[in-house]
Each structure stands twice: as structure tokens, then as C-alpha cells.
Image (spheres, grey):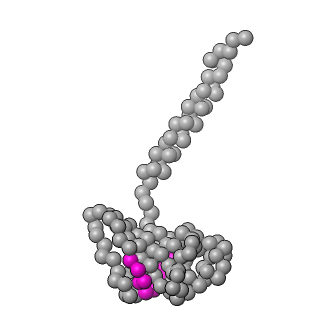
Amino acid sequence: MRISINKHKHVYILIIVIILCSLIYAWYLYNKPHQGVEKIKPVITTSAVNFYHLYSENEGEGDKKFSGKVIELSGIVDDVELSDSSFSVHLAAGNTLSGINCSMYFPKKKQIEPPKIGSVILIKGRCAGYLMDVNLVDCIIEK
């Protein structure tokens, strides 16, 4: 029994088209520009203490409401951690062991001055969930 390539020609072409479409889509996702939070309106604007209590009282409900959403918080800077291209600001939340952790990146050409410990800031970022701290990513300092 001999199977001719001509009989399965359509199947081979379909497989090649699927592979090409997958590669094009992967290339598009890889090269898609990062979407910051600058122009996105926050779903809630509140204090860091209030937001932490909203989240810590019911983590599951907090995840449903805020995970992946843009949040704007005001609070007192408790700690700042620096690296080459990023820094992390920890906002006090009325709990000595936890708070709000805000991570932000800056381009190598543009150095951003991190806030001083004890200063009051307004920060906007995307909520990434709760793990001892409430975590915000892609943050920018508004004031």
C-alpha cells in the first residue's frame, strides 16, 4: 500500500500555515510595546493604609476587585530599595510587618530620584496581588 504525497498535500499545507501564523503571532507579542499606567485611569484612589486593609480583610475578594487593575495610592514611604534599572518603594500600611510594595523601572538614559524615607507620595501602579505585602508593579510617582 503506497500513500501518495499528493493525497496529503492539503494537510501539509495546513500544518505549514498554522506554524507560520503561530510564529508571526509570537513575534508580534514579543515586539509589542510595554503599556504603562500613565494614561490609564485608576479604578480606586485611596490611602495605602485603607487599601491594605481592604485587601488583607478578604484576599480573595481583593484579588477579584483589584488584581491587574490600576490603583492610585497616597502613603508614607517606609523603605526604598535600589538596583541598576529599578527601585522598589514600600509604603507603610499601619502594620509593622507588611505594607504596599511598589516596583518601578526607569530607562537607563533617565535616572529617577527615589523618594526619601518618611515622605508622603502619590503613586500609581498595576495591582499584582497579595503576598505578605500588597504588590503594585509598573508604578509611577505622581507627586
> How far across and down, in percent of the image, does residue 112 sit?
31, 73
| Residue that protrudes farthest toward the front in the picture | 97
Q: How many marks?
A: 0
Q: Nearer the viewer, residue 108 or 34?
A: 108
Q: Is residue 69 left or right of residue 119?
A: right
Q: In which quarter of the image is residue 59?
A: bottom right
**Residue drawn at 42 percent across, 51 percent down:** 31
Residue 38 in sight from this viewpoint: no
| Residue that protrudes farthest toward the left in the picture | 109
**Residue drawn at 53 percent across, 86 percent down:** 95
Q: Nearer the viewer, residue 48 or 96?
A: 96
Instruction: Name the image quarter holding the N terminus.
Output: top right
Q: Give the range drawn in magenta.
A: 69-80
Q: Does the magenta stretch include residue 72?
A: yes
Q: Is residue 138 above or below residue 13?
A: below
**Residue drawn at 41 percent across, 80 percent down:** 79
Q: Nearer the viewer, residue 120 or 32?
A: 120
> How far across and down, in percent of the image, does residue 32 sit?
44, 54
> How far across and down, in percent of the image, does residue 26 sit?
50, 46
Q: Is residue 22 magenta?
A: no
Residue 88 in sight from this viewpoint: yes
Q: Is residue 56 left or right of residue 139?
A: right
Q: In this view, does 95 lie above or below 109?
A: below
Per the picture, the main secondary structure of the magenta-coloured stretch is: strand
Q: In this view, does 64 lie to the left or right of 81?
A: right
**Residue drawn at 56 percent across, 75 percent down:** 132
| Residue that protrudes farthest toward the top in the picture | 1
Instruction: Name the image quarter holding the C terminus.
Output: bottom left
> How far across and down, in percent of the image, does residue 130 sit?
57, 73
